[in-house]
Amino acid sequence: MNDQASRPMTPEEEIAEMRSQPRPTLRAVSEGMEKHLYTAQPVLDHGFVRVIDYMGDDAAITQAARVSYGKGTKSVQNDEGLIRYLMRHWHSTPFEMCEIKLHVKLPVFVARQWIRHRTANVNEYSARYSILDREFYIPPAEHLAAQSVVNNQGRGDVLEGEEAARVLEILKRDSNQAYDSYEAMISQDGQAGLARELARMNLPTNIYTQWYWKVDLHNLFHFLRLRADPHAQYEIRVYADAICEMVRDWVPFAYGAFEDYRMGAQQLSGKGVECLKRRLAGEVVTQENSGMSKGEWREFEAVWGDA
Ligand SMILES: Cc1cc2nc3c(=O)[nH]c(=O)nc-3n(C[C@H](O)[C@H](O)[C@H](O)COP(=O)(O)OP(=O)(O)OC[C@H]3O[C@@H](n4cnc5c(N)ncnc54)[C@H](O)[C@@H]3O)c2cc1C
């Protein structure tokens, strides 16, 4: 008897099967993205992100732009130049012509941050219908950091020694204890068994969930700009970083423009522009004569130096 037919496929078997059946198509194909298709990229201890489907490529962006600009695009002959022009001038709708559908497995507390990005289509694993797996995110020791003393929304130094060991112990113990209780409550062995939709309320937010997440490239860039940023929490940032690698291969011109004009760029306020001009003219500008608040000045100097 075929072993595979008698049990559900493992994720690896499922991926191998999906990748083993290429079909010819007339649709736009991104060679860079084809290598990622269906393959799960591991993230955190039990999570992953994988591309389930995508639509469009760099050419789809320029094709859409040329419809709107018509003859006006003749001056920008090459696709990369046009894409950089669009990104530079916040002409965003051509980027919406590309879409990506991801399968993501992530801890619930990461999902809570992720779901705030409202411009995607989401379908989540139902813990009303199915039983959740005993899978909890337990941070590796190097990510077990103390509360930051300078940023209420951040981390400071890594915990050490006994404190680190105690925290890890608490996280593991509580996760397992909560899951034992979950199993005990839903069990139908000699009892009615509590509904799954109720039993789940007792589980901690480091338990893993899964969803399909579909978004267009413009809104994906917005998500990546915020979540691949050093200010984002590490646990969501690693997902954003993994997606960045995929997008770089999918639409290399658009990703290059995004890296340059969004990720690598700095925003300057009107006062910031004035201060920079005064500095370039040789004037010594301080916070007191800059017109900026202390916080603004600190952020200004962090980028432009304290000269
Ligand atoms: C470092 C960091 C810290 C954060 N801290 C907090 C926090 O302490 N508390 C908290 O609650 N959130 C927090 N957030 C979440 C943040 O406020 C946003 O909700 C999240 O980043 C999603 O951004 P967005 O609304 O621009 O994205 P999306 O929902 O994807 O929307 C994209 C854009 O579409 C437009 N849009 C979408 N829906 C609407 C709508 N209904 N009405 C009007 N315009 C719309 C907006 O222009 C928006 O910018 C934080 C985010 C980051 C990155």
Image (tube, rainbow, N blue to C red):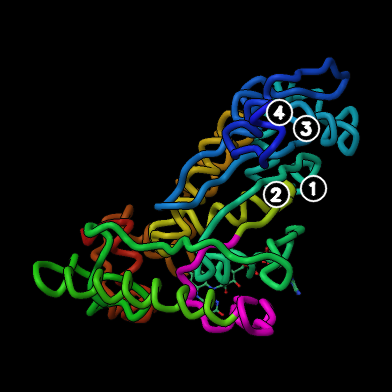
Q: Residue at x 72, y 33 (%)?
A: 5
Q: Residue at x 39, y 59 (%)?
A: 234
Q: Which of 169 and 256 is in front in this view?
A: 169
Q: Quadrant of ligand 1?
A: bottom right
Residue, disc 4:
18
The image shows residue 276, relative to residue 251, as above or below, that is below
Q: Residue 9 at what x, y percent from top left?
A: 65, 37
Q: Which disc number belongs to residue 56?
A: 3
Q: How far apart are marks 1 and 3 (CA)?
A: 13 Å
Q: What residue type is labelled 4?
A: Met
Q: Which of marks 3 and 2 is in front?
A: 3
Q: Which residue is drawn at 31% across and 56% down?
A: 304
Residue at the front extreme?
190
Q: Is residue 72 visible?
A: yes
Q: Nearer the viewer, mark 4 or mark 1?
A: 4
Residue 203 on the magenta segment? yes
> Quarter-wise, where is residue 140 in the image?
bottom left
Q: What residue type is labelled 1?
A: Thr
* Contact between labelled residues 1 and 2, with CB atoms less than 8 Å apart: yes
Q: Which of marks 3 and 2 is nearer the N terminus?
A: 3
Q: How far apart are marks 4 and 3 (CA)?
A: 20 Å
Specify whether tag 2 is near ligand 1 (CB below 8 Å): no
